[in-house]
């Protein structure tokens, strides 16, 4: 399935829409991939907004590797990781990767495609492609039941004409 965005605001709205339909008990692991400047962090800021988290505190954790953001009491936490500077799976594990995988959290890993074998089997992969100055195409691939359910709820939330399938 794919989705299109024509502006940073629409990219953030896609992140927000997924967070809003998220099953808070199950949580979700999202692997974001795409070139530098594709809008990965913009998407995460939108997801933060959907979870009731102030997006102004969400920045790319390139040097700290991962940040945890708390929303309203009892809300879904957001773990935002950036794997760009990680060189190997052992380094990823040493950075605390397994600690990020808590039930009920939305875990978003920018550059997650660098370590596909380390990622949870149940995950949503979002590949971002630039299609214009501000336009983006998001290709969504679910791996596992939680990811499939989240993607189905997202498509339903964005219907009618939900930006296509592929």
Image (cartoon, rainbow, N blue to C red):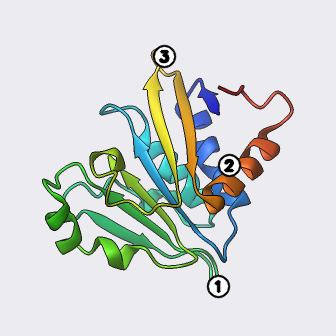
Under circle 1, the secondary element is loop
Give how far across and how far down residue 10 sits, in percent: 62, 34
- Asked if residue 74 shows in the view, the reply is yes
Can you tell which quarter of the image residue 7 is in? top right
Determine whether, in the image, residue 93 is placed left or right of residue 16: left
Image quarter in which the N terminus is found: top right
Give the mark nearest the N terminus, 1 or 3. 1
For label 3, the residue is 131
Q: Circle 2: is it few (<14), some (14-19), or many (20+) Cα within 10 Å?
A: many
Circles 1, 3 touching at the beta carbon (< 8 Å): no
| Element assignment for label 2 | helix
Task: Report if the CB atoms under discs 1 and 2 are less than 8 Å apart.
Answer: no
* Marks 2 and 3 close (CB-CB < 8 Å): no
- Residue under label 2, please give it: 151
| Crowdedness near tag 1: few (<14), some (14–19) or many (≥20) residues, C-alpha within 10 Å | few
Q: Measuring from the top left, give residue 119's x and y in whole percent.
A: 38, 59
x and y percentages locating residue 65 in the rendered image: 25, 62
Mark linked to residue 74: 1
Numbered mark located on residue 88 in the image: none
Quarter of the image with the C terminus is top right
At a point 48% along the width and 16% down the height, the residue shown is 131
Spatial CA distance of label 1 from label 2 is: 23 Å
Name the residue: 21% across, 64% down. 92
Q: Secondary structure at mark 3?
A: loop
Compared with residue 13, is residue 102 higher up or lower down, i.e. above or below? below
């Amino acid at each position: 399935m794919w989705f299109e965005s024509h502006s940073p605001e629409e990219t953030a709205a896609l992140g927000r829409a997924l967070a809003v339909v998220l099953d808070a008990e199950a949580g979700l692991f999202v692997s974001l991939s795409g070139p530098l400047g594709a809008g990965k962090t913009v998407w995460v800021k939108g997801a933060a907004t959907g979870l009731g988290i102030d997006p102004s505190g969400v920045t790319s954790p390139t040097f700290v590797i991962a940040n945890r953001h708390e929303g309203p009491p009892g809300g879904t936490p957001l773990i935002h990781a950036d794997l760009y500077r990680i060189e190997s799976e052992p380094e990823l594990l040493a950075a605390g990767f397994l600690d990020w995988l808590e039930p009920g959290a939305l875990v978003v890993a920018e550059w997650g495609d660098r370590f596909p074998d380390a990622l949870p089997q149940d995950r949503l992969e979002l590949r971002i492609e630039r299609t214009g100055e501000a336009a983006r195409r998001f290709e969504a691939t679910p791996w596992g039941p939680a990811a499939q359910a989240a993607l189905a709820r997202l498509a339903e939330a964005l219907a009618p004409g939900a930006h296509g399938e592929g």
